Each structure stands twice: as structure tokens, then as C-alpha cells.
Amino acid sequence: MRAAVYTRAGGGTLPPAVELLLVRHGLPLRIENPDGAPADPPLAPAGRAQAERLAAWLAPERIDALYASPLRRARETAEPLARARGLEIRTEPGVVEFDPHAASYIPLEELKAQDREAWLALVRGGLTAGIDVVDFRATLVAALERIIAANPGGRVAVVCHGGVINGWAAHVLGLETSLFFDPAYTSVNRFAAARSGERGLVSLNETAHLR
């Protein structure tokens, strides 16, 4: 899916001031804490390989700044790209997932294979049960707007989470729902931010590096 053309009211094209690359983290390990402690899983071996492939795939592109959610799976996904470019990983709490204090993390693909009924319950609304979705979306939008404002004219990568990518995409497209597609692990999702305030979708779910 690609689209991002901005036009002035009086004619002519207004190029985007910032290209925003929202990257979902790589595959994490499954974590289930019976004591209720927050699960903050590291990347699984497959997730680390995905992160390395991501860094190699983005090698031809200019990246001016790199941000990540404070959760471990996001920061570990950003590390190969940071090393390759000599970039600092800037932590942005506003792009954390909607359930950062959950006691378990079960990859949806694994849950689907093991317990389809539980997976269906989650995709039908269980993922955000008890979550203030309006507040979550407002928080992530404000965080990404801060990143845009801090990097005029730049291409910025933000390693975050599926809920964050969904929420920002829905905001840009004017959708009421905040969860409408499934970003793949380490997928790249591109958005353009014009100086005049328009926000456009360029692409969703780029995964050529995983093939």
C-alpha cells in the first residue's frame, strides 16, 4: 500500500518534511510470570536474526535518528541498526505498547497454533480489554508528533509495537478503530509528515528482508 502526495490549495506540490519509519520489534521469547510481575521479554533467536536482516535491508537508506520504546524487545531490535549507523537509541516512553505491565507475552502466531479459540477471543477485542484505547492513542500520537518536530527534514526510524503502528496509521487515515491490521515482526511502515501539518501513509508492512 503506497500513497503520499500533498498539494497546496493554490497548486503545486509540498514535499514531506519528515519521513517516519515505524518498525515493529522482532519476535520475542514467550514469557508467563505466575507471580504477576510484568513480562518484558528479550528477543528470541529468530527475533535477533530478524533485527540483523532489518539493519542490512535498511543499509542503503539514510537514517538520521533512531528511537525505541523502553521495552526490551524494541531496544534489542534497534541495536543492530544503531551499531551499523553509529546512532544513539533514543528512548521514547510514549511509543510503549498498550499493555506494558502485562504478566505474560505470548506471540499471537504461537497462540493461534496452540489455542485457536483463545486467539480468536483476543483478535475480537480481548487484546485491549481494560485498556483506555482513546488515551493510548492520544499518548502515542503526541509522542510521534514530538519526534517529527524534533527532526525537521529527516528520516527517522522508531522501533515500537503493533498497537502503536496500528494507532498511528488509524490516526493518519482517519479511522475510528485503533487495531485494523497485523504488522509483521520487524516490518517497516512508512509515513510522511508535511511542514504544513498533513500526515500521509506511504507504505504498510514492508517485509522483503524476511523472505
Image (cartoon, rainbow, N blue to C red):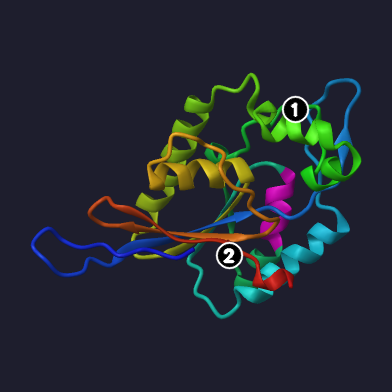
- Relative image position of residue 184 (x, y in whole percent): 68, 56
Of marks 1 and 2, the one in the foreground: 1
| Highlighted magenta segment, given as a residue range | 72-79
- Relative image position of residue 2 (x, y in whole percent): 45, 65
Residue at screen point 74% across, 68% down: 52
Is 87 included in the stretch rendered in magenta? no
Instruction: Say whether residue 60 is visible.
Output: yes
Quadrant containing the C terminus is: bottom right
Residue 87 disc label: 2
Is 75 included in the stretch rendered in magenta? yes
The kind of secondary structure the magenta stretch mainly shows is helix
- Relative image position of residue 96 (x, y in whole percent): 61, 38
Of the pair 178 and 95, the residue shown nearer to us = 178
> Tag 2's secondary structure?
loop
Residue hosting label 1 = 102
Of the pair 55 and 204, the residue shown nearer to us = 204
210 w.r.t. 44: above or below: below
Residue at screen point 40% across, 47% down: 173
Residue at screen point 60% across, 71% down: 85
